[in-house]
Amino acid sequence: MKIITTLLLFSGLVLAGSSISISSINSFKETDSPVRKVFKNPDEKKQQLILWTSGDREVALKMVFMYSLNCKKYSWMDNVRLLIWGPSAKLLSGDAELQKYLSELKKAGVELYACKACADMYGVSEKLTNLGVTVVYAGKMLADLQKDGWFILSI
């Protein structure tokens, strides 16, 4: 009997929780954004750094490049910067398809940077520079962007 009562009570809680969630979803408008409410000053510039460290090609195609391009193209953020760091530098330097996508990012206005220390370790600094990437020692830049309130997305 206790088991049945407990199950009924639990089911009631789950259903009550679901109806709240469903009504919340149904009343959500595309213009509403719970994230926008965390900004202290809505007029403040929104700046996004995508820190790309993964050597996984699918991650580059299905997340890094897609988000970077759309973030800039649709003005989700005022400034969008891609920082290529570590294994991603090696991957990009040898992949023609990724280089083509990188060119599209540049045309859209995404700022392109790569960590010089990492690029030098992989021997790809010159190749990245030729692709239009600004190759710099990026550690301090990353710290400064965080201090300046940039949003950092690390992939």
Image: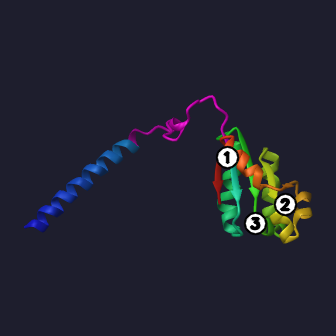
Label 2 crowding class (10 Å Cα cut-off): few <14, some 14-19, many 20+? many
Residue 50 versus residue 24 in the image, above or below: below
16 left or right of 125? left
Indicate the position of residue 65 as horizontal and vertical percent values.
71, 56
Q: Give the range drawn in magenta.
A: 26-47
Decide if residue 78 is on the left or right side of residue 9: right
Q: In which quarter of the image is the C terminus?
A: bottom right
User: Which residue, given by chain and number where applicable, does mark 2 sit on?
Assistant: 116
Q: To which residue does mark 3 refer?
A: 86
Dot 1: within a 10 Å radius of its alpha carbon, few (fewer than 14), some, or many (20 or more) residues? few
Where is 69 relative to 36, above or below?
Answer: below
Decide whether residue 43 is among the magenta residues. Answer: yes
The amino acid type, in three-letter code, at marker 2 is Lys
Q: What residue type is labelled 3?
A: Gly
Q: What residue type is labelled 1?
A: Gln
Instruction: Place residue 27 in its image quadrant.
Output: top left
Answer with mark 1 or mark 3, whichever residue precedes in sequence.
3
* Residue under the image location 88 percent in, 70 percent down: 123
Q: Where is residue 43 in the image (x, y as percent from the top left)?
A: 63, 28
The residue wearing badge 1 is 146
Residue 130, image quadrant: bottom right
